[in-house]
Image (tube, rainbow, N blue to C red):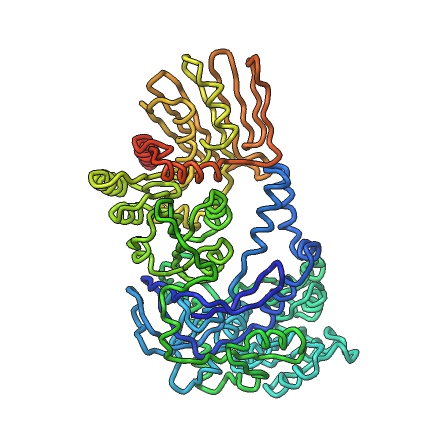
Amino acid sequence: MKQLIQYLDSGKTEILQAPKPQSQSGNLLIESTCSLISAGTERMLLNFSKASYLQKAKQQPEKVKQVLDKVKTDGLVTTYDAVKSKLSEPIPLGYCNVGRILEAGKYTEGFQAGDRVISNGPHADLVRVAKNLCAKIPDDVDDESAAFTVLASIALQGIRLAKPTLGETVVVTGVGLIGLMAVQLLRANGCRVLAIDFDQQKLELAERFGAHTCNPSKGEDPVEVGMAFSRGRGVDAVIITASTQSSDPVSQAAQMSRQRGRIILVGVAGLELNRAEFYEKELSFQVSCSYGPGRYDPNYEEKGQDYPLGFVRWTEQRNFEAVLDLMSLGQLDVSVLITHRYVFSEATSAYQTLTNDPKSLGILLIYENIGSEEKLVSSVSLSHAQEFQADKPIIGFVGAGNYASRMLIPAFKEANAQLHTIATSGGTSGVIHGEKNHFSETTTDTQAMLANPQINTIAIVTRHNSHAGFVSTALANGKNVFVEKPLAIDLEQLKQVDKAYKQQLESSPVRLMVGFNRRFSPQVVKMKSLLQGSVQAKSIIMTVNAGSIPPDHWTQDINVGGGRIIGEACHFIDLMRFLVGTSITSVNARCLENGDGKKQDDVTIITLGFADGSLGSIHYFANGAASYPKERVEVFAGEKILQLDNFRKLKGYGFKDFKNLDLWQQDKGHKACAKAFLDSIIDGKPCPIDYAELYEVAKITINVAQQLDNQ
């Protein structure tokens, strides 16, 4: 398939050749026929990507604060690398797609192959979209008109929040694409409409749709015109669809509104509000969220859980359907809004038009080669073909998310790994990170890669619930395996891995490694060496300022991420196991309970006892301040103390020949961990972490999660 992407650091826009996305339950695979460029959103992205770093910072002051906090805790170099990596990650463009369904996955009732649908899919000739973000197109609505559905739904949701009634006076401030459709939708609702804009050409279109107009660039005062339009009573509602940093649209809306009028912000405007303007009239002000209820809710969008009709009449999908019905009835005409058409292969020219032609409105991308088999290939060769040495690790990566792309793949690359294939579900990220890190191939057929006889080593960096399955399959194919933690998210998965590992050992000596990188940090290695001579039991305190993660994030989902204890706290259980050096004999865990009795299992104290009498306490807290360092490790043993702060500063107390080991930048051992694993394969040595320890840590971590669940 081919997909349009935008680089935020360089401003470059390009079409990427990628494998077709994997089919997924609850999703539709759609062959695109046309898509609409969102003039406001996509022009803003283009301008942001072409801005200097200083200009980018000025546009996002809240991000600057986060960066400064990270500098304080993690250091300048680490923070710089993180920001640079984030900005170098290209993003897909577009969210107004029309096409025909090629494949309907499981649990996509109401859709079937061959249906014409709209979706919020990106600009690509093949898209995979969750069913609740799609809607069927009526037979009498053409593809080009249907492409406006998603943008029109943004306007419709703003109108629903304003709750206009027949005969009310409503102002639309800013009549770009969304504003012009808002005018028509309000007119269809029986409202009198006043359109305000500085562009006379757009106002003429608004007049064509039945609106009165006001052009401030001609000296017309919006407040005076609004008051006159409402016969001196004040308008009933104002819908702001403009995009500006100025607070004038909101202030003007307040001044022209009647008592208890409604103001809805659909676009972007400054929010330096005058309290008196709102207080005296008891005005209501609300910001509209995109297409409607369900937006940004993973249960609705990703898992396909619809809201009950009796309680939520208009979800984002039902808003899509309402817009299409209005088009079918002739009450919403978007054909006159189309100003340009480009074939998809000339998409970069379309964006030059978007940037250089202020009069452009609806810019359509028309897709060629409908029905071509070329876009359906599951694997794509990259530009770094190479000869592989069979007696050394030849790596296949599963996953190219944030951790894989920022940490693990670069670590393997720096260790001179032979990077063969990178497999992803969607295809696009595999191409981006495959090219960047010199892989030979990218694929969305993960099972074929796991069985590829040329690949002898697999690295797995996917969502946690998939780890055990991929590990077991890779082991069954005789591969060495490196899996990002956790090894498994429940006991059944752990048994599955254990069985696969032991069965494979009977036929060939494979290695299974979990990415417990912290034990490979240079400072932790130093701590281990300093503690080596001590025969006395150790007392260890680990404080983890984990930070809050929204409850709807996938890592918090017990069935997907396993929860934060299994997903992350396993790191610290392993680190403590490493520092003590003997098996764990007891475990006790307790989490915070809120006043309402609800458990907060990411605010937890875990106490571990060890075979040599050592005792450790892990304070895993998600309720701390982000400005405080994330991790501290303190070891008390034999009248000596070691204190490690955030993998940057190590201090020793009571040692004759050691006082401190400070690093210029944070080093959590990612590179050393990857290198140790690869070296063990090359040198024919055992895995750097014994399998018995990996199994023990996984089982103890699951035990902790069960204790908290039963608390």
Which residue occupies the foreground of this view, 501 or 98? 501
Q: Can residue 190 be seen in this view?
A: yes
Count of marks, rendered view? 0
Which residue occupies the foreground of this view, 67 or 207? 67
Which residue occupies the foreground of this view, 41 or 326? 41
Query: In the picture shown, does residue 384 fall above or below 33?
Result: above
Query: In the picture shown, does residue 630 fall above or below 92?
Result: above
Q: In screen coordinates, is 639 left or right of 53?
A: left
Return the x and y of residue 566 as percentages of the image width and height.
Answer: 37, 39
Q: Measuring 54% from the left and 32% from the top, which residue is drawn there?
A: 647
Query: In the picture shown, does residue 273 fall above or below 373?
Result: above
Return the x and y of residue 225 as percentages of the image width and height.
Answer: 72, 78
Return the x and y of residue 469 as percentages of the image width and height.
Answer: 29, 48
Q: Measuring 49% from the left and 71% from the top, which residue is drawn there?
A: 123
Q: In screen coordinates, is 709 left or right of 361?
A: left
Return the x and y of residue 341 as percentages of the image width and height.
Answer: 55, 83
- The quadrant where residue 273 appears: bottom right
Question: Quadrant location of the N terminus?
Answer: bottom left
- As drawn, the residue found furthest toward the right would be 219
Question: Quadrant location of the C terminus?
Answer: top left
Q: Is residue 595 visible?
A: no
